[in-house]
Amino acid sequence: ENCEWKTYQDWLEPDMPRMRQILVEVHKAPGNVALDFFDKHEEQGYVRFHKEPNIQYNDGSCVEYAFLGLEKEFIPPKPADVTEVSVETEGKK
């Protein structure tokens, strides 16, 4: 449990066999590491096709994700002008 945040980059190394599907349960997503987790999967051609919170045995802080490995060319590049939204501006006019 929680090893996914330390090992996910190993799954995506070029010398590792390419997996067609990845099913992983993540635990208490640690902010920027979680963002990198999803970005790295996408950069390597993996898309999320399923998300399911584990609410039966915990408080919902564990979530199962399923990724499907596609050819990288299938995923369009992100626009260069995408800006981050600040949480601090929420509720301000």
Image (tube, helix red, strand yellow):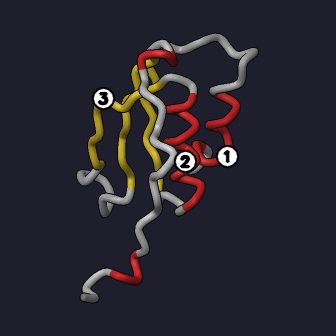
Q: Which of marks 2 and 1 is in front?
A: 1
Query: In terms of depth relative to the viewer, which is nearer, 80 or 32?
Result: 80
User: Element type at marker 2?
Assistant: loop
Q: Where is residue 3 in the image (x, y as percent from the top left)?
A: 62, 45
Q: Which of marks 3 and 1 is nearer the N terminus?
A: 1
On screen, residue 78 versus residue 61, left or right, reads right
**Is 42 placed above or below 80 here?**
above
Q: Distance between the residues labelled 3 and 2?
A: 22 Å
Residue identified by numbered label 3: 49
Which amino acid type is marked by label 3?
Phe
Q: Which of marks 3 and 2 is in front?
A: 3
Residue identified by numbered label 1: 6
Query: In terms of depth relative to the viewer, which is nearer, 79 or 70?
Result: 79
Q: Earlier in the sequence, mark 2 or mark 1?
A: 2
Q: Which residue is drawn at 51% across and 18% down?
A: 72
Query: In terms of depth relative to the viewer, which is nearer, 44 or 78?
Result: 78
Residue identified by numbered label 2: 1
Q: Position of residue 2 (x, y in %)?
A: 57, 50
